[in-house]
């Protein structure tokens, strides 16, 4: 007897032998037991998951002779009808390849033969594989027979592309969607086959084959057959990697560690080593994407026990992981059709490291908030060259967000601070202390913290508590809330009044996430779900009294060396920062895409004249 490959030898012959499709097999068994058989069934799913096998088992269940000519939910597999169906020579089960018999003439012949009674069993079954390959005319010719077939005729269809089947056909069938199998199910089935065949299969090797099969049991069985032919009856993980070019898990972890550490040399060295070893670079990139995905899931839902993924996740933020996944997802499509895969993968890794080193918009906001409050820049797990350079590169931000320097009258104020007098009050306040202590009083005088008295005042004016808390935590994002005035609380709605000048900034200030944050704070303070409502009918806040003396000395600053003295400490702080900026550094800072984005969002400008030679 000729050799039979594993994919044919271990093909399911009964419903309980179908792996991972219990939702299909149980439904079919219950339909047979309850005598609720439809005239047509459509099996949909990816390759190698059991579509045609399930259809053949259903055909056996309909024509099995062990139940005295009645359908059974457990075909015996030994009677003449079951054996003939399994071997593909039954006169009552006609298997048709939709790709080869897709003409309207073939369907007309099928309709004519359907009128004849079955030769042995109670049903004549037509099993059409890859039914989506039928032509439009063939589908139209099949419609009437499919909807009202003779009582002894059943139609079983199988396809991998259900979207190509006309809706008129789909509506006449009961559709079953078969799932892609998990690596655990495939590995378990491979170990079962190895036990029956007296093969020593390493569980790690079975897991490697299962991952490479991509959810298809038939592919996994064929791969196992190939490995047995390569190395005999003892199979290890190294054998599987050698035959199919799979990359070891340790190598993928090494590549991910080099990527997250911004080690371009190390990452390219790993790719070079794998390319010279003949590994599949497209699969290497896919494994890297899968590992990044596991790291992201581990950060969202930390595992109970530490793992390699959780350790790598400590050095990168969720935002950066999302950026990397988007980037490498696009790179997978390009790599699939690339002639030089190594070149494409090298470029993808270099760009990924560049994306990790870039400053995101949240980094810009954190840096601006820190500079506004006089605190040091926040440390990040990933290096950000544009925000970790010497102090000279950060000086434009300080000048743009502070009124202490001589260029403050030329700065366009941020939207969140257009009606707030805090910055002029803080910077123009004379302070006899030495220069290093000038930035210490960062809190605006008009915003004393009411947090300790929050429980007492929340019932009468909950808005003041929430506004002070939000503006203290994030002055740039929620500083504008202090301009609101609590009006009343009607049921679960809190009404706040804002000056009319803020109405044109509705999209900038009252964006959905900001409103959601405010409602969460109000709900936590008041208790229960609270809705935040606002109107623009309030009084404009008084103009700050100090800006006048600030703007007056400005013309003298551009023509004479002495600086305007609003306080000796302020002059000492501003003078060292300005000469440290060269025109080239200022221009490079202004041209940074993320800085431009931040200025666009806040509708601000950074205007700073470079120091002129004496």
Image (cartoon, rainbow, N blue to C red):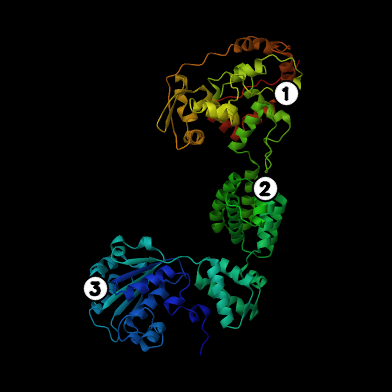
Residue drawn at the location 41% of the way across and 68% of the way down: 23
Do the CB atoms of the residues marked 1 and 2 lie less than 8 Å apart? no
Q: Quadrant of the C terminus?
A: top right
**Where is 425 relative to 319, above or below?**
above
Q: Is residue 247 left or right of residue 130?
A: right
Asked which secondary structure carries label 1, the reply is: helix
Q: Nearer the viewer, mark 1 or mark 2?
A: 2
How crowded is the residue under tag 3: few (<14 C-alpha within 10 Å), some, or many (20+)? Answer: some
How crowded is the residue under tag 2: few (<14 C-alpha within 10 Å), some, or many (20+)? Answer: few
Residue 271 placement: quadrant = bottom right
Residue receiving disc 1: 577
Residue receiving disc 3: 149
Q: Earlier in the sequence, mark 1 or mark 2?
A: 2
**Where is 267 relative to 369, above or below?**
below
Residue 315: numbered disc: 2
Residue drawn at the location 65% of the way across and 47% of the way down: 316
Residue 490: numbered disc: none
Where's residue 65, x and y in %? 34, 86
How crowded is the residue under tag 1: few (<14 C-alpha within 10 Å), some, or many (20+)? Answer: some
Asked which secondary structure carries label 3, the reply is: loop
Q: CA distance from mark 1 to mark 2?
A: 32 Å
The single residue placed furthest to the front in the displayed view is 456
Q: Earlier in the sequence, mark 3 or mark 2?
A: 3
């Amino acid at each position: 007897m000729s050799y039979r490959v594993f994919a044919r030898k271990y093909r399911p012959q009964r419903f309980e032998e179908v792996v991972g499709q219990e939702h299909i097999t149980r439904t079919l068994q219950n339909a047979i037991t309850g005598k609720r058989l439809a005239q047509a069934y459509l099996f949909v799913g990816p390759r190698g998951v059991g579509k045609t096998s399930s259809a053949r088992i259903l055909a056996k269940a309909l024509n099995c002779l062990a139940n005295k000519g009645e359908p059974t939910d457990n075909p015996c597999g030994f009677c003449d009808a079951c054996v003939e169906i399994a071997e593909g020579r039954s006169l009552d089960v006609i298997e048709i390849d939709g790709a080869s018999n897709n003409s309207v003439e073939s369907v007309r012949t099928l309709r004519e033969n359907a009128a004849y009674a079955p030769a042995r069993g109670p049903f004549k079954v037509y099993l059409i594989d890859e039914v989506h390959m039928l032509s439009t005319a063939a589908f139209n010719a099949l419609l009437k027979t499919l909807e009202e077939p003779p009582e002894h005729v059943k139609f079983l269809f199988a396809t991998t592309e259900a979207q190509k089947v006309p809706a008129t056909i789909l509506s006449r069938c009961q559709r079953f969607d078969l799932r892609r199998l998990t690596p655990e199910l495939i590995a378990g089935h491979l170990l079962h086959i190895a036990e029956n065949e007296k093969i020593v299969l390493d569980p790690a090797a079975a897991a490697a084959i299962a991952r490479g099969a991509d959810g298809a049991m038939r592919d996994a069985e064929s791969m196992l057959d190939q490995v047995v032919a390569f190395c005999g009856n003892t199979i290890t993980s190294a054998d599987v990697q050698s035959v199919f070019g799979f990359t070891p898990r340790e190598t993928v972890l090494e590549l991910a560690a080099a990527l997250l550490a911004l080690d371009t040399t190390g990452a390219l060295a790993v790719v070079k080593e794998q390319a010279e070893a003949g590994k599949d670079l497209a699969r290497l990139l896919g494994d890297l994407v899968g590992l990044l995905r596991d790291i992201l899931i581990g950060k969202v839902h930390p595992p109970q026990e530490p793992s390699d993924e959780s350790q790598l996740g400590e050095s990168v933020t969720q935002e950066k992981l999302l950026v990397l996944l988007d980037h490498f997802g696009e790179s997978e499509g390009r790599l699939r059709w690339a002639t030089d895969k190594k070149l494409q993968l090298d470029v993808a890794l270099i760009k990924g490291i560049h994306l990790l080193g870039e400053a995101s918009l949240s980094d810009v906001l954190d840096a601006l908030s820190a500079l506004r409050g006089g605190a040091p820049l926040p440390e990040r797990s990933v290096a950000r060259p544009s925000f970790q350079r010497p102090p000279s590169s950060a000086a434009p931000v300080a000048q743009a967000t502070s009124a202490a320097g001589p260029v403050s009258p030329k700065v366009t104020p941020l939207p969140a601070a257009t009606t707030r007098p805090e910055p002029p009050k803080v910077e123009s306040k004379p302070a006899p202390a030495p220069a290093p202590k000038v930035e210490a009083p960062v809190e605006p005088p008009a915003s004393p913290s009411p947090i300790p008295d929050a429980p007492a005042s929340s019932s009468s004016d909950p808005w003041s508590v929430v506004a002070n808390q939000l503006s203290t935590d994030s002055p740039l994002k929620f500083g504008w809330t202090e301009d609101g005035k609590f009006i009343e609380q009607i049921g679960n709605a809190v009404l706040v009044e804002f000056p009319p000048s803020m109405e044109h900034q509705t999209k900038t200030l009252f964006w959905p996430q900001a409103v959601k944050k405010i409602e969460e704070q109000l709900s936590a303070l008041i208790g229960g779900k609270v809705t935040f409502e606002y109107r623009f009918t309030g009084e404009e806040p008084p103009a700050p009294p100090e800006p006048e003396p600030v703007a007056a000395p400005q013309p003298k600053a551009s023509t004479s060396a002495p600086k305007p003295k609003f306080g000796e400490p302020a002059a000492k702080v501003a003078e060292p920062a300005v000469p440290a900026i060269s025109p080239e550094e200022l221009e490079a800072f202004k041209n940074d895409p993320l800085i431009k984005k931040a200025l666009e969002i806040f509708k601000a400008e950074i205007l700073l004249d470079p120091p002129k030679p004496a």
